[in-house]
Image (cartoon, helix red, strand yellow):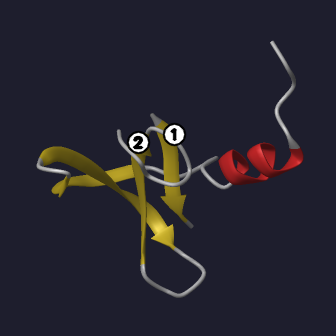
Amino acid sequence: MSAPTRIEREHYQNLIGRQILAIYWDEMEGKALPILVLSGRDLDGHAATAAVLADPEGNAPGHLDHHL
């Protein structure tokens, strides 16, 4: 296994200490996509959220995307 990159470490570091407060359902390409509502706010002051995608570009459901 390769070591995580600096960008990957920074991306996931933001999740430490967050709590899942709620789950709401969105859709992606006609499929259900759970969105986790987390404690705290993102950098723009909006609710912090996370969703599992296939990759950072969001081509399908696998990469844990978040807005913190």
Q: Is residue 6 left or right of residue 9?
A: right
Q: Are the residues tagged 2 and 1 within 8 Å (C-beta)? A: yes
Please indicate whether residue 8 sits to the left or right of residue 48 in the image: right
| SS at badge 1 | strand
Q: Nearer the viewer, residue 48 or 32?
A: 32
Amino acid, disc 2: Val
Quadrant where the N terminus sits is: top right
* Label 1: how many Cα within 10 Å (few below 14, some 14–19, many 20+): some
Spot occupied by residue 38 in the image (x, y as percentages of width and height): 41, 58
Q: Position of residue 7 (x, y in %)?
A: 81, 51
Q: Identify the amino acid type marked 1.
A: His
Label 2 neighbour load within 10 Å: few <14, some 14-19, many 20+: some
Residue 16 versus residue 2 in the image, above or below: below
Earlier sequence position, callout 2 versus callout 1: 2
In terms of secondary structure, where does tag 2 sit?
strand
Q: Residue at x 54, y 87 (%)?
A: 44
Q: Position of residue 29 (x, y in %)?
A: 19, 51
Give the number of the disc on residue 10. Answer: none
| 21 up-or-down from 68: above or below | above
Q: Farthest residue toward the bottom?
A: 44
| Nearer to us in this view, 2 or 67 | 2
Q: Residue at x 66, y 55 (%)?
A: 14
Query: Left or right: where does residue 62 sit relative to residue 4?
Result: left
Where the C terminus falls, by quadrant? Answer: bottom right
Residue to which mark 1 is pinned: 63
Q: Which disc number belongs to residue 52?
A: 2
